[in-house]
Image (cartoon, rainbow, N blue to C red):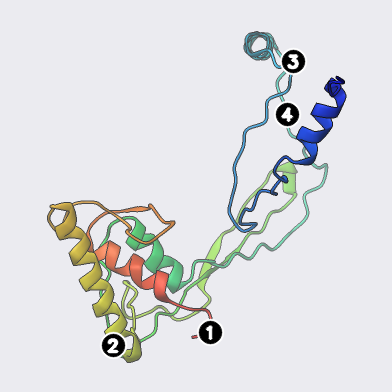
């Protein structure tokens, strides 16, 4: 009686095994990784950095910027680059109160033109600085936000969602809250901040 060989049994096992299913993944999902070289030596890197710092401390080299033999006149004009919208964002991030205004008032950005003159008499630099406003100053120093009437209903819906999240978490309106939207775990300072955060989630690019 002949017995099947070992190679026949292995071939038969491979032939009747389940097919390999490729891994399905979302190409839009962000994936983060940290790469370390195979021969990475942390202790050696620390010693090398410490040695470089000691070498810098022991150096007696003093840098002296070059000075031109003859100074020439030049004009430098600088304009304040911050916009009213950026000022609103900075005040919001700093936790300052931002007034809401439905009027047609707009905040004008103001800049300054700085004129710098220098002379070469006696090889001595003499700066003459003159500051003039480039645009008329705004009557109000604090910027105002103008909401579209069509967004009031959506903002109220976001306020209700933020309030429900506050009650679910068992905290008050001044307590930090985590955004309940899927894929977003950002922590906001209070209910008001969460309301605006949810409202930005709902804004579409086609509006």
- What percent of the width, then of the height, locates residue 95? 28, 57
At label 1, counting other C-alpha atoms closer than 10 Å, the crowd grade (few under 14, some 14-19, many 20 or more) is: few
Residue under the image location 73 percent in, 48 percent down: 121
In this rendering, the label closer to the viewer, 4 or 2: 2
Report the residue marked by disc 1. 206
CA separation, marks 3 and 4? Answer: 41 Å
Q: Are marks 3 and 2 in contact (CB under 8 Å)?
A: no
- What percent of the width, then of the height, locates residue 169? 18, 53
- What percent of the width, then of the height, locates residue 49? 65, 15
In this rendering, the label closer to the viewer, 3 or 2: 3
CA separation, marks 1 and 4? Answer: 56 Å
Please tell me the numbered disc located at residue 102: 2
81 relative position to 40: left or right: left
In this rendering, the label closer to the viewer, 1 or 4: 1
Residue 40's place in the image compared with 17, above or below, is above
Report the residue marked by disc 4. 64
Residue under the image location 41 percent in, 78 percent down: 137
CA separation, marks 4 and 2? Answer: 56 Å
14 relative position to 136: left or right: right
Report the residue marked by disc 3. 39
Residue under the image location 60 percent in, 46 percent down: 31
């Amino acid at each position: 009686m002949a017995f099947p060989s070992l190679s026949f049994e292995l071939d038969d096992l491979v032939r009747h095994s389940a097919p390999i299913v490729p891994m399905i993944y979302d190409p839009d999902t962000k994936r983060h990784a940290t790469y370390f070289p195979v021969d990475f030596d942390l202790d050696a890197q620390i010693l090398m950095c410490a040695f470089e710092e000691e070498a810098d401390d022991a150096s007696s080299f003093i840098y002296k910027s070059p000075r031109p033999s003859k100074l020439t006149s030049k004009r430098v004009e600088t304009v304040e680059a911050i916009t009213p919208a950026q000022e609103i964002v900075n005040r919001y991030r700093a936790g300052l109160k931002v007034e809401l205004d439905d009027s047609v008032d707009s905040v004008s950005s103001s800049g300054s033109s700085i004129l710098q003159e220098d002379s070469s008499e006696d090889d001595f630099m003499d700066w003459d600085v003159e500051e003039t406003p480039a645009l008329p100053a705004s009557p109000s120093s604090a910027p105002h936000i103008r909401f579209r009437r069509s967004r009031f209903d959506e903002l109220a819906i976001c306020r209700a969602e933020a309030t429900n999240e506050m009650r679910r978490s068992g905290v008050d309106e001044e307590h930090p809250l985590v955004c309940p939207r899927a894929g977003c775990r950002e922590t906001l300072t209070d209910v008001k901040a969460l309301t605006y955060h949810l409202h930005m989630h709902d804004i579409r690019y086609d509006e």
